[in-house]
Image: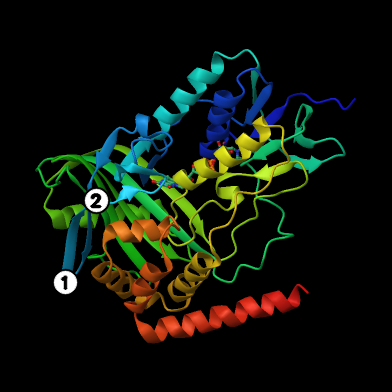
Amino acid sequence: MPRHDADLIIAGAGCAGLSALHFALQREPDRRIIVIDRSFEPIDDRTWAFWGSARSPFADIADRRWDRLRVRFPTWNSTQHLQRPHAPAPTNRRTYMRVRRRDYDAEILRAAERQPNVRFVAQDISGLHDDRNGGVVSLPEGELRAPVVLQSALAPPPTNRAEVRHPLRQHFGGWEVVTDRPVFDPNVATLMDFDTEQHGAASFVYVLPESPNRALVEHTTFSTDVRGRDFHRQCVDGYLDRLGVGSFDVTRAEYGVIPMEDAPPAQRWGQHIWNIGTMGGRTKPTSGYTFARTHTQTQHLISQWAAGAALTPQPDAPRRFAFADRTLLHILHRRPELGRAVFERLFRSTPIDDVLTFLDEGSGLRADARMVAALPQLPFIRAAAAEAVAGLRSCWSTR
Ligand SMILES: Cc1cc2nc3c(=O)[nH]c(=O)nc-3n(C[C@H](O)[C@H](O)[C@H](O)COP(=O)(O)OP(=O)(O)OC[C@H]3O[C@@H](n4cnc5c(N)ncnc54)[C@H](O)[C@@H]3O)c2cc1C
């Protein structure tokens, strides 16, 4: 009999790992699960914003909700009510929500700590491999084995991954501020404020307000060269100054770099090992949103594991969405000076609600065609043609 240390190993206990743990405990509370991370100390380094309905995973622990979103450009802006039902729960209207990592971790870990069959291992994972009977996780103190390993800690090997041609990064720095003057509208979240210096890339400010004096203000840039915290801090300071906030206190800061690549990593590492979350390619390449997509993937894999079925990857969306992502990445990479104009055309022609449906890869062909027709024609035609040719080349080279 093969020796397994658990029925499931979750390697990496960030967003994706804890999501898998949450769904596994919902489905199979009595099975043996090992969760490994280099640390389980509480951490407050990020907040996750996403859109969905009241029934979306973790909507119940969202500490803020907005049903009005704003986009802003130097000569035009628009504030819109979210009105569409959220697709998987058609009776529920969509809202934009925020979950704090500290609440998410506490909620899931508190429930898991009550389960005697869940073991937490605080060690640095040095490698992963398959053997005949399961996935093996290498740790300084030895190896752990399970028939299924869901991992979000290590970058998957580059084999079976297509060449990345547009290695963009979304890098950002956000500060939660309490301002002297009341300048924020707590009912409206600013998705993108492009009325700011572009720095030779696509740059915008994102604002999640809590009260007239309190908000998370985040400066974001899409580019290949990653800029550090100081750069983003200067941009946020300049933005707050333009808003006329007066003096302000910083209560929390976050900084992040998210891949925006045309060839996301595969979901499968090996026969028994699956990549989840960012390592499993769950980041939407053109927006960086990962949170909601990760839960869809972990729910899918865990329901197969719970049923004792062979695991299969979460199915891909229709190919036109990946093609649209690649085309937009092509423009942001090769013609960064067009970034702001592209987003402006997109939001002038398409309601924010419909852009969110498109980002969810849930829009219909006709809506997509209408949206694409409104974008700057020549650069898009050129970018789409280049991407189509590159796609054909990679098909031929893999034959
Ligand atoms: C500051 C920030 C804000 C973000 N905001 C949003 C947002 O608003 N909306 C959204 O959709 N997405 C957002 N994202 C993107 C994405 O949702 C997050 O990065 C998310 O945390 C990804 O989940 P993950 O589980 O794949 O990776 P992580 O959450 O980073 O988890 C990986 C885990 O693996 C562990 N680990 C790594 N290496 C090892 C090792 N060798 N040994 C042991 N353990 C290891 C780490 O300690 C970590 O706990 C944000 C990202 C950042 C950085």
Q: Which numbered disc, 1 or 2, marks the residue that appears first in the sequence?
A: 1
In the image, taking residue 59 as reference, residue 313 lies left or right, namely right
In the image, taking residue 397 as reference, residue 346 lies left or right, namely left
Write the residue at 60% across / 64% down: 263
Amino acid type of the residue tagged 2 in the rendering: Gln
Against 163, is 95 above or below? above
Amino acid type of the residue tagged 1 in the rendering: Thr
- Asked if the residue at tag 2 contacts the one at tag 1, i.e. Cβ–Cβ closer than 8 Å, the answer is no
Against 28, is 167 above or below? below
Q: Position of residue 142 (x, y in %)?
A: 80, 28
Task: Tell which residue pokes out farthest to the front in this image.
Answer: 91
Residue at numbered disc 1: 75
Q: Give the CA distance from mark 1 to mark 2.
A: 25 Å
Against 146, is 82 above or below? below
Residue closest to the eye, 354 or 159? 354
Residues packed near mark 2 inside 10 Å, few (<14), some (14 to 19) or many (20 plus):
some
Write the residue at 30% across / 46% down: 94
Asked if ligand 1 lies within 8 A of label 2, the reply is: no
Q: Judging from the image, what secondary structure is the residue with disc 1 in?
A: loop
Image quarter of residue 181: top left
Q: Position of residue 271 (x, y in %)?
A: 78, 45
Residue closest to the eye, 23 or 230? 23
Write the residue at 26% across / 71% down: 349
Q: Quadrant of the N terminus?
A: top right
Residues packed near mark 1 inside 10 Å, few (<14), some (14 to 19) or many (20 plus):
few
Q: Position of residue 77 (x, y in %)?
A: 17, 64
Against 375, is 22 above or below? above
Residue at numbered disc 2: 83
